[in-house]
Image (cartoon, rainbow, N blue to C red):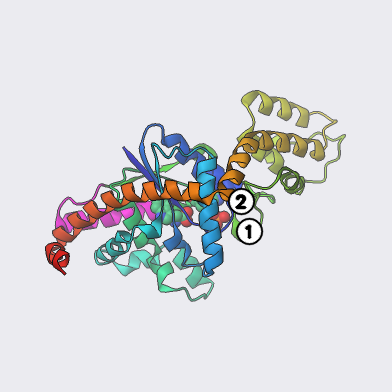
Amino acid sequence: MRALTGIKPTATPHLGNLLGAIAPALALQEKADAFYFIADYHALTTLQDAERMRQYTREVAATWLALGLDPARTSLFVQSDIPEVTELTWLLACVLGSGALERAHAYKAAQQDGREVNVGTFLYPVLMAADILIYDSNAVPVGKDQKQHVEMARDMAQAFNSRFGEVFVIPEPIIAEAVATIPGLDGRKMSKSYGNTIEVWLPAKQLRKKIMSITTDSRGVDEVKDPDTCNVFALYKLFATPEQIAALAERYRAPGLGYGHAKEELFQVVEARLAPARVRYEHLLAHPEEIDAVLDAGTRRARTIAAGVLARARQAVGFAGAPRRAVM
Ligand code: ADP
Ligand code: TRP
């Protein structure tokens, strides 16, 4: 089985990205031939600042590695190092009706708010389908918000195959249901667009401060509390062991626990999980040549597969150019 996923380098990674996208993908690398990439072509639809693009690309690569991506087994690369993807985007664009793109979430939302979007944003789902199909991917681990895009990739693969023969593998989305939506500081979905994120690599002191700013109701220490409606507890459940979760739930239901105490417990479990990886992350950012060596090896593996699948697709549509191009 081949697994593939991408993360856009548009911000410093937050706990929603970690639990919703990175951790489930890392769990898959044990049993799949995994290809994970940094989606800079996609990022360019919104991030148009070269220095930040470079910075976030390094940060996302270091994040994957610090959290346990095994470069011996999993290929890590940058999307724009595989330009074959943009050519496949064109082939797929020609078998897709524009109605499907008009119905895509990001475009529809922009239309409803009366915002004009660039053509890259309109074509976003086609580029994403090319990403998936060009590696013969079977499984695509993504957060719930990306499910529609993977379904569109399936539709494009099927449309292409029925017109030109069996060229593409039909991919399946893999959604980590247990952690489907990670709540942010205010209880809404953690997202950089809501400004309610907890960044993965905050130094311990700042991490603690962020956790202390989580919104709670105004119940005092002596009042009993409901763990099931509490933003602090919702995050705690994602990091603590079943025993720790049961113990803290019991303390919520009895007088004597203030939200400050609950937040301290949350800080302790998050810090325990992140501290060792933070050391690796900081080491990698200080040694970019180590990141580059991993990306170079990943690019070679990814590009070999991409070139093969693209050649298949070109042949299927009747482009006879490959040998002629070689002579030029
Ligand atoms: P943001 O919402 O902050 O812009 P992205 O859209 O860049 O985050 O998300 C990158 C990946 O992380 C996607 O696969 C997405 O599904 C996942 N993800 C982001 N936020 C969350 C969240 N709050 N819960 C679960 N998964 C998330
Ligand atoms: N669109 C995805 C996101 O915003 C990132 C992405 C780009 C991706 N190409 C992909 C995810 C291919 C999975 C497969 O999170």
Left/right of residue 65 with respect to residue 79 in the rendered view: right
How far from the left and from the top, in percent, is residue 237? 63, 34
Residue ID for mark 1: 194
Q: Secondary structure at mark 1?
A: helix
How far from the left and from the top, in percent, is residue 140? 38, 45
Front residue of this view, candidates 109 and 315: 315
- Can residue 181 be seen at all in this image of the molecule? no
For the N terminus, the image quarter is top left
Q: Is residue 128 magenta?
A: no
Q: Are marks 2 and 1 in contact (CB under 8 Å)?
A: yes
Which region is colored magenta? 149-169
Q: Is mark 1 within 8 Å of ligand 1?
A: yes
Left/right of residue 80 with respect to residue 176 in the rendered view: left
- Residue drawn at x 63%, y 38% as measured from the top left: 274
Q: Residues within 10 Å of mark 2 (few under 14, many from 20)?
A: many
Residue ID for mark 2: 190
Q: Given the image, on which type of amino acid does mark 1 rest?
A: Tyr
Picture quadrant of residue 141: top left
Disc 2 from disc 1: Cα separation: 7 Å
Left/right of residue 325 with respect to residue 65 in the rendered view: left
Does residue 311 sit above or below 101 in this rendering?
above
Q: Given the image, on which type of amino acid does mark 2 rest?
A: Met
Q: Residues within 10 Å of mark 1 (few under 14, many from 20)?
A: few
